[in-house]
Image: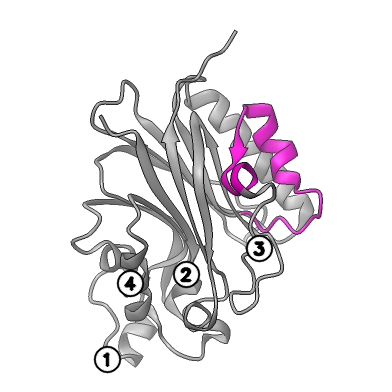
Amino acid sequence: MIQTLRVATYNIHKGFSPFSRRMAIHELRDKLRGLDSDLVFLQEVHGNHEHHAARYEDWPDVPQYEFLADAVWDDFAYGRNAVYDAGHHGNAILSRYPITRWDNQDISSHRFEQRGLLHCEIEIPGWQQPLHCVCVHLALTARSRGAQLEKLRQRIERWVPADAPLIVAGDFNDWHWRHKATHELAHPLNMHEAFELVHGVPARSFPAAMPLLRLDRIYVRGFEASHAHVHHGRAWARLSDHAALTATLRLIPLVFP
């Protein structure tokens, strides 16, 4: 039975380099493949953009999530959040294992910052229960993030069994030094952040060239983390303004009183 999963989360900046100076989606796909992850949580993924397709000769003929999945990840799900005249973008999950159910919940605070929760159930061979995965990209303001964290907590309490394995990953935009997402979301739900388990604190992930802010997270329940790494530096900084995070997770039984 499969006991270990390698997980990645990455805000891909819509497939463009920082400040949108050049298209980077092809290089980004090569880098993602090199991470050798079983599950990939992506934010700011274009589902469609007619203007970019007309401007760039090598713009993918399929949605970015499908282009990135290619022949490596057999299944994928996409949650459309921001919709505009030229197209739309949102969150995506790429998986080596079958996604049996998925849903995208609108948690937008206002029409100028559209956000969603992409919730997938994934069938892992040999596991008694499906793995629940939620990909998030939260708001820039503390007030909006607080409301979104509450909606995320309510969704998990309603739809995820307390003894089911769970991963919540993405761009939390959690600027606060006290890591409010950990206190307001993870602790009430018996979850732990992968980098906190391995290194004692969440990862510095922004900006990618020299990460200072701990914006991106991988929260887990029912797993122990044996490895957690930030992928940053010059090569990664050419692809997005965020660094990619990876963690190696081992399934453990959940025991509740």
Q: Residues in magenta?
A: 172-198
Identified by mark 2, the residue type is Ile
Q: Amino acid at mark 4?
A: Arg
Rendered residue at 49%/77% (across/down)? 236
Observer-side mark, 2 or 4, equals 4
Q: SS of the residue at dot 2?
A: loop
Residue position marked by numbered label 2 in the rendering: 12
Q: Which label's residue is closer to the chain start, 1 or 4?
A: 4
The x, y position of residue 238, in whole percent, is 49, 84
- Numbered disc in front, either 4 or 3: 3
Residue 133 versus residue 57 in the image, above or below: above
Instruction: Select label 3 or label 1 by which is in front.
Output: 3
Question: Left of 170 or right of it: where is 252?
Answer: left
Q: Residue at x 52, y 86 (%)?
A: 20
Q: Element at badge 3?
A: loop
Query: Tag 2 or tag 3, which sits nearer the N-term?
Result: 2
Residue that label 1 marks: 57
Alpha carbon distance from label 2 to label 4: 10 Å
- Disc 3: CA contacts within 10 A as few (<14), some (14-19) or many (>=20): many
* CB under 8 Å between discs 3 and 2: no
Where does the N terminus fall, quadrant-wise? top left
**Disc nearest the viewer among 3 and 2:** 3
